[in-house]
Amino acid sequence: MGKRSEFDRIPRDFYPTPPAAVDPLLPHLHKANVQLFCEPCAGDGQLIDTLELAGLRCCYKSDIQPGRIDIVEQDALELDEMKILEADAIITNPPWRRDLLHPMIEYFMSLKPTWLLFDADWIHTKQAAELISYCRLIVSVGRVKWIPDSKHTGKDNVCWYYFTKYMQTKETEFIGRQ
């Protein structure tokens, strides 16, 4: 039985982040005293809303095709460091395509400590080798129900990955599902 399906993908991989996917991240944000964040792949703002309900505040939000009026139209790789100076971190659910994801990891972590939600299989690929040394923490989420009215969860397990611009001197910490 195959892990992947033949279903058509949603254009631009626009899958809003359900609150259940954010719950495992919250204790780590609170522990690190993250209060202000930037969301450069904001889509319709669902991740922003969930984080703000948990007491954080979004100081800058953008997307290449904003899903609401308070989100700036901007390519994530053109994020201006001056606009996010006050942010404690970048937090986003980026596109998972490796040709987009890897440049985003490199760029975002050069600006601010960065939390990204994407597939758990990434850590097992050769492509991850040069970037994993900048990953301090991986928080397992498991499978996510991306489409609210669906009876099924997604086919991939996901994790939150915490990247910084500093190469790690110790092994990346992994937090399993709670």
Image (tube, grey):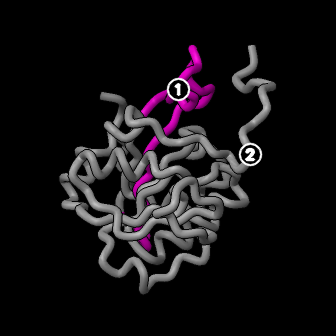
Q: Kindly identify which numbered label has been placed on residue 148.
A: 1
Residue 11 is tagged as: 2
Left or right: residue 171 versus residue 110 is left
138 relative to 152, above or below: below
On whether residue 151 falls in the magenta region, the answer is yes
Image point (21%, 52%), residue name: 55
Q: Is residue 64 magenta?
A: no
Earlier residue among tags 1 and 2: 2
Neighbor class of circle 1 (other Cα within 10 Å; few <14, some 14-19, many 20+) is few
Observer-nearest residue: 10 or 166?
Answer: 10
> In the figure, 110 relative to 56: above or below?
below
Q: How crowded is mark 2: few (under 14 residues within 10 Å), some or many (20 or more)?
A: few
**What percent of the width, then of the height, locates residue 47?**
42, 48
Quadrant assignment, res 162: bottom left
Q: Give the range drawn in magenta.
A: 141-169
- What secondary structure do most residues of the magenta stretch adopt? loop
- Identify the residue shown where x is 74% and y is 13%: 1
71 in relation to 165, above or below = above
Going by the numbered disc 1, the residue's amino acid type is Pro
**Viewer-side residue, 69 vs 165:** 69
